[in-house]
Amino acid sequence: MSKAALQTMGEINAVKVLLTTSNGQNGDMAKGLKRVHREPYASEQFDSHPNVVAEPTSPEIEYLSSVDLTPLEDVDLLVNTLLDRLDSKDWLTVCEAFNHARQIAVFHTSSMVNILESVVALTIKALKSPRSTLCKTAIMATADFLKAYQDLMFDFLDSLLLQLLLKASQDKRFVCEEAERALVAMTTWMAPTPLLQKLKPYVSHRNPRIRAKASVCVYKSVSKLGIEGIKDFGLETLIQIAASQLNDQLPEARESARKMVMDLHAAYQKFPSYGHSLDVQNVECKQEKWEWEQFCQRQLPPRTAHAVLRVTCIAT
């Protein structure tokens, strides 16, 4: 092969190397591209939690905690335009309206009572939004509504509760954690007995995550009942709810069930004549005390009763 041919072949090979250099600066320059630094994706930032999604940054939206809210000046004007702004097609306008709604709920509570039903309906609509920023803002507003209006929220709680449980069960951490805080506000500020009636269907939901979140809420509500509240609601019903979760798929549900069983056991010991449907303070009534074991065996299937007794035996 001639010297000229060898020289030409060497030049061709040099060009190939230049073009195929893996992620190299020369390869980029050959393509006319400028190297740009790429920030890691959210999934790369949480390698140990592959299902957790980081909070997207939004420079136009500020998430204000309840303690950072301030009173409003033009309350009447903002209330009169609130529903239209909450129903706007511009999500930034909706987020701003939710922040105003939160301020109204916290500092001017009575001003929103007449339109509360419509506000909650639009809040549920926002909770269903695929836009995480809007969803989180609506959840934060929900927590403030639950604290401000407490038992008034029972009339609108059915659809709202389902959405909160769904959001608390999802993988987007910054939405999930906000929904959990809203559920805490719900169990803190709402009457436990009617709330338990609302929560009861969800402890048998087909979605294990929803069951787990509902179990936590049930336990927190039961812990607020007191002895008389447990008696009025029905110890039989409560022990059946708790027992059904002892072997649940998720540890969050199992742990809540164990704590609830121990609380119910402690309560049972304080009214041993409960099973006889008599006033436990009536000293004229001399009745045999029901044993906890007998009570569980009466109310539960054998295997479930054994699980409950095992929990209480370990606790004592």
Image (cartoon, rainbow, N blue to C red):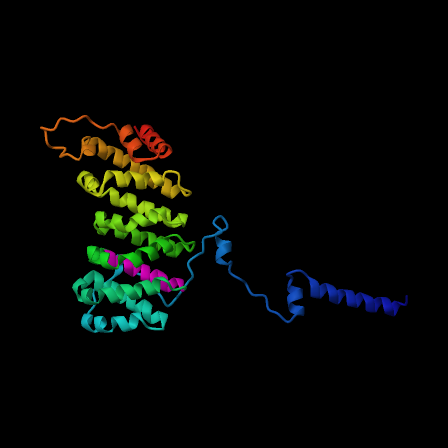
Instruction: Pick the residue in front: 231 or 218.
Output: 231
**Side of 308 relative to 275 (left or right):** right
Q: From this viewpoint, is residue 210 visible?
A: yes
Numbered range of the magenta stretch: 131-146
Helix, strand or loop for the magenta stretch, by majority: helix
Q: Is residue 200 above or below residue 261?
A: below
The image shows residue 12 at horizontal and vertical percentages of 78, 67
Work out which residue is located at the far right of the displayed protein and give it. Answer: 1
Residue 132 part of the magenta segment: yes
The image shows residue 60 at horizontal and vertical percentages of 37, 68
Q: Is residue 271 above or below residue 54?
A: above
The structure residue drawn at horizontal position 39% and vertical position 66%, both measured from the top left corner, is: 59
**Side of 48 relative to 254 (left or right):** right
Q: Is residue 129 above or below residue 180?
A: below
Q: From this viewpoint, is residue 63 visible?
A: no
Please tell me in which quadrant of the rendered image residue 81 appears: bottom left
Work out which residue is located at the far left of the displayed protein and give it. Answer: 284
The image shows residue 33 at horizontal and vertical percentages of 61, 70
The structure residue drawn at horizontal position 36% and vertical position 43%, both measured from the top left corner, is: 253
The image shows residue 49 at horizontal and vertical percentages of 47, 49
Question: In the picture, which quadrant includes the C terminus?
Answer: top left
Residue 234 part of the magenta segment: no
